């Protein structure tokens, strides 16, 4: 009997926590993609040009993302047969970092960036 009561309390507690988390997520305002560009003083074209010049390659994809470093353009550049992820500061247009591209974990449309 005590096990059944403990199991029931556990189920109620987990259900309450799940509903609370879902409600908090639903209450969070979703930002319109068109409004995201207001966070950048550098244009997408300028960010792509900076990434291409740095790696002497061709950009194949780019997007504006919020990161720990602030707003950053994530530009994918192919150079010498290798694909790179390039982070470009959306406020200054400077290349912050680049690395050899690996498969995305956050984008269901990409098998490999």
Image: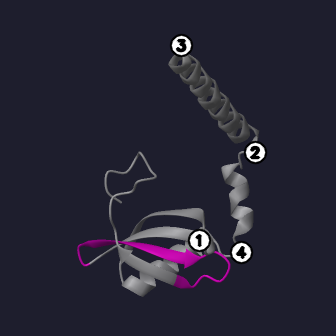
User: SS for tag 2?
Assistant: loop
Between marks 4 and 1, how big is the CA–CA gap?
11 Å
Mark with earlier residue (2, 4): 2
Q: Residue at x 40, y 46 (%)?
A: 109
Mark number, residue 41: 4
Q: Residue at x 50, y 75 (%)?
A: 87
Q: How many marks?
A: 4
Q: Which residues are magenta?
A: 80-95
User: SS for tag 3?
Assistant: loop
Quarter residue 69 falls in: bottom right
Between marks 1 and 3, how big is the CA–CA gap?
57 Å
Q: Is residue 99 left or right of residue 106?
A: left
Mark with earlier residue (1, 2): 2
Mark number, residue 113: none
User: SS for tag 1?
Assistant: strand
User: SS for tag 4?
Assistant: loop
Between marks 1 and 2, how big is the CA–CA gap?
21 Å
Q: Is residue 98 left or right of residue 8?
A: left
Between marks 2 and 4, how big is the CA–CA gap?
23 Å
Mark with earlier residue (3, 2): 3
**Mark 2–mark 4 contact, CB under 8 Å?**
no
Mark with earlier residue (1, 3): 3
In the image shown, does 75 or 1 lie closer to the viewer? Answer: 1
Residue 61 in percent (x, y) is at: 44, 62
Q: Nearer the viewer, mark 4 or mark 1?
A: 1
Residue 34 in percent (x, y) is at: 69, 53
Mark number, residue 1: 3
């Amino acid at each position: 009997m005590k096990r059944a009561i403990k199991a029931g309390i556990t189920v109620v507690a987990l259900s309450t926590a799940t509903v609370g988390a879902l409600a908090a997520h639903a209450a969070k305002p979703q930002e319109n993609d068109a409004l995201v560009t207001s966070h950048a003083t550098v244009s997408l074209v300028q960010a792509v040009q900076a990434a291409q010049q740095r790696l002497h390659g061709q950009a194949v994809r780019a997007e504006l993302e919020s990161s720990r470093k602030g707003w950053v353009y994530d530009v994918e550049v192919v150079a010498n047969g290798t694909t790179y992820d390039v982070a470009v500061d959306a406020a200054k247009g400077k290349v912050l970092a680049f690395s050899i591209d690996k498969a995305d974990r956050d984008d269901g449309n990409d098998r490999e960036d």
